[in-house]
Image (cartoon, rainbow, N blue to C red):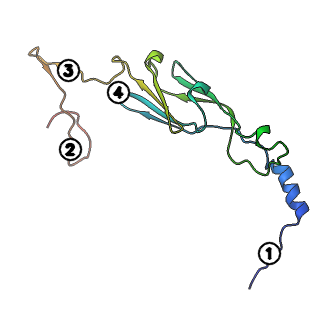
Amino acid sequence: MTTTMEPVAPWLRDLNRFFTNEGAVAAFIPPADVIVADDGVRVYMDVPGVSGEQLDIELENDLLTVRGERPLPYGAQDGGDQVTRRIERAFGKFERTLRVPRGLEPDSIKASLKDGVLTLQLPKPESLKPRKIPIQGGDSQPRDIEGTTSSADTGVSTGAPA
């Protein structure tokens, strides 16, 4: 069986455009990746069409905030009497707040912008970096904890060396 589709009536198409705001500009929300490692935090944020002068970066406690504006590239200089048919890309002011580990130093943030990608490097201070803690034995010499073993019969970890 073949189904024939009739084209959508022009008045119905216009009504759909009215309700969906097809010509409206969507808000710009830049996507971001947050990578937490032992030595620090790296943030990668896509901000195409935004220059470094249009960005503001702030770290307060465990909240990293990036503010800026992706300007609309079209205006009166592009033809004056133009009709907007569709704008699918997003533009405008934006603010992204990302949660990062506590204790990072705002003065140590390194920021770079290349090919529309904002890269932030936030090194962890020495006090936050993981470190191995030696255990003092009965003979007053430091020794390290080896690891845990598990019993083959029960599958339960004993926590003591075999």
Determine which residue is flagged by label 4: 39
Q: What element carries label 3?
A: loop
Q: Residue at x 91, y 61 (%)?
A: 11
Q: What element carries label 4?
A: loop
Q: Residue at x 38, y 22 (%)?
A: 124
Of 154 and 122, nearer the camera is 122
Q: Residue 85: x percent and y percent?
A: 79, 51
Q: Which residue lies furthest to the left in this view?
A: 139
Q: What element carries label 2?
A: loop
- Badge 4 or badge 2: first in the primary sequence: 4
- Badge 3 or badge 4: first in the primary sequence: 4
Determine which residue is flagged by label 1: 5
Of 161 and 7, nearer the camera is 7
Q: Residue 41 carries which label?
A: none
- Badge 2 or badge 1: first in the primary sequence: 1
- Disc 4 to disc 1, how far (Cα)? 60 Å
Disc 3 residue type? Pro
Of 7 and 80, nearer the camera is 80
From the viewer's perspective, is the residue at label 4 or at label 2 nearer?
Answer: 4
Q: Residue 107: x percent and y percent?
A: 46, 15
Q: How crowded is mark 3: few (under 14 residues within 10 Å), some or many (20 or more)?
A: few
Q: In which quarter of the image is residue 148?
A: top left
The image quadrant where one finds the N terminus is: bottom right
**Relative to 87, 134 lies left or right:** left
- Disc 1 to disc 3, how far (Cα)? 76 Å
- Badge 4 or badge 1: first in the primary sequence: 1
From the viewer's perspective, is the residue at label 1 or at label 3 nearer?
Answer: 1
Of 5 and 113, nearer the camera is 113
Q: In the rendered structure, are the residues bearing label 4 and label 2 in contact, judged by CB atoms less than 8 Å apart?
A: no
